[in-house]
Amino acid sequence: MEDLMVFITFCLASPAYVRNPYLRGRLVEVLHALMPPNEDPGSGFNAPPRTQASHAEIAALFQAHPLVLDNMVKSLVQLYVDIEMTDRHNTFYEKFTTRYQIGEIMAYLWQLPQHQASWRGVAKEHPYIYVRFINMMINDSQFLLQEALETLPKVQEVERAMEDEAAWAALPDAERTEREEQLRTDRGRLKSDFYLASVCIQTMQYTAADEAVGSLYFDLQVRDRQARILNFFLKYLTLPSERRKLKLREPERYNWHPGRLVAQLASLHVSLFRRDAAAWVEACVADTDYLGNAPDIFEYLDQVLVRLGTLPAADLADLRSLAKRVDQARLEAEAEEQALDDIPPEFEDPVLGTLMRDPVKLPSGNVLDRATIMQHLLTDQRDPFSRVPMSEKDMEPMPELQAQIAAWLAEQRRARAAAAAAAEEKTDMEEG
């Protein structure tokens, strides 16, 4: 068994020798089958109880073999990212199977202190890879929930039709068979979508709470997207008008545990708020897609959590503090945005149409905000204008332009403050 574990670990840790991510994914499949049993199914980890005869030897190798301790976490993080780029025709759905297996293995490893130390080392020594890993989890969880939302009505429609047994039996055999086969396919997809999405959220939850690893969630490439994906899920889990779309008769049958997921999402918000309150409030305010269109998400989240009673009192108090600060900051941001309608073209990000805060020049000569191009490079390491390969080191800072933008912004704020003071003085004079 030791020889097999060493072989798997060496191959996973050597992408220069095993270049094809799909082949490394097959090794993960073997590793996943060898995993020790989940001895505490109620621990909150998604991995189901396992029933293989003997796992003492494999558990010892996971827990103590130096090659495994030094390389396993980094290899799995790297493969999670690399599997996105395989050229196989069926790779889009294959990658989710591999990532689900990676997620279960990593959930097991996180329970072992010696692997947590290795995990922190990866975050410290290879932050670029780990930030891409976070970005892929965000992408996956959003895609999977969106796909589930598209599949759910199909399942609900057939299940309602089957309730009328007489009408269902009266359908032509061919049509009934076709709809039953499609129902089995859709049920399987729902089960897979919900399960992998929960694995992604769970991985974010336990790593974001860690001091060393959690700091990478504030990298400008992923911070605002992280807030947005949490609110994306919470929109469908808390708003009364949206919760109906995810209602199932037998949710456990589909690996769907909305109460547990709500608590995990709330815990994530709290962990990141505690780490850097000002930055996390800023990230939440930047979410104009979900929280911006439904500012009462936190209010409904509070109601759901009180009803469930699963969040510790201290966490609920911090969540309420976050909601209060977000409401205040959002009002201030809206006022500033209205005052910045006429942004000079040379200060405007050409992709997003927003005010640049940290302008950089690309190899093509175009100027973008650093946050915009960094997010682009997570999934495409090319200049978006010339399509020439580039990386972060190819960006040229523009301190003079940045200073001009800062001066213009300060002047806009001074003018707005002066106008507000004048209006208040006029009101006082009229009342006097």
Image (spheres, helix red, strand yellow):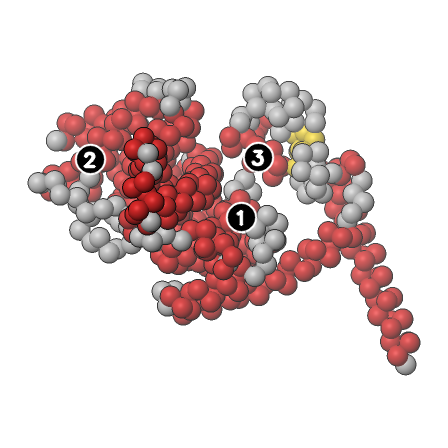
User: Horizontal and vertical percent for residue 216?
Assistant: 47, 44
Q: Farthest residue in the left direction? A: 53
Which of discs 2 and 3 lies nearer the camera? The answer is 2
Question: Dot 1 lies on which element?
Answer: helix
Residue 155, placed above or below residue 242: above
- Image check: 208 left or right of 327? left
Gap between marks 2 and 3, in whole Å? 37 Å
Q: Earlier in the sequence, mark 2 or mark 3?
A: 2
Residue at image mark 3: 374
Check disc 1 and give the amino acid type.
Answer: Arg
Residue at image mark 2: 33
User: Horizontal and vertical percent for residue 148?
Assistant: 42, 42
Q: Residue at (33%, 23%) from the top-left corner?
A: 22
User: Horizontal and vertical percent for residue 155?
Assistant: 38, 43
User: Horizontal and vertical percent for residue 83?
Assistant: 38, 28
Q: Residue at (38%, 25%) from the top-left corner?
A: 91
Q: Earlier in the sequence, mark 1 or mark 2?
A: 2
Task: Work out whether residue 23 or residue 255 is closer to the camera in this orientation and state it.
Answer: 255
Residue at image mark 1: 228
Gap between marks 1 and 2, in whole Å? 34 Å
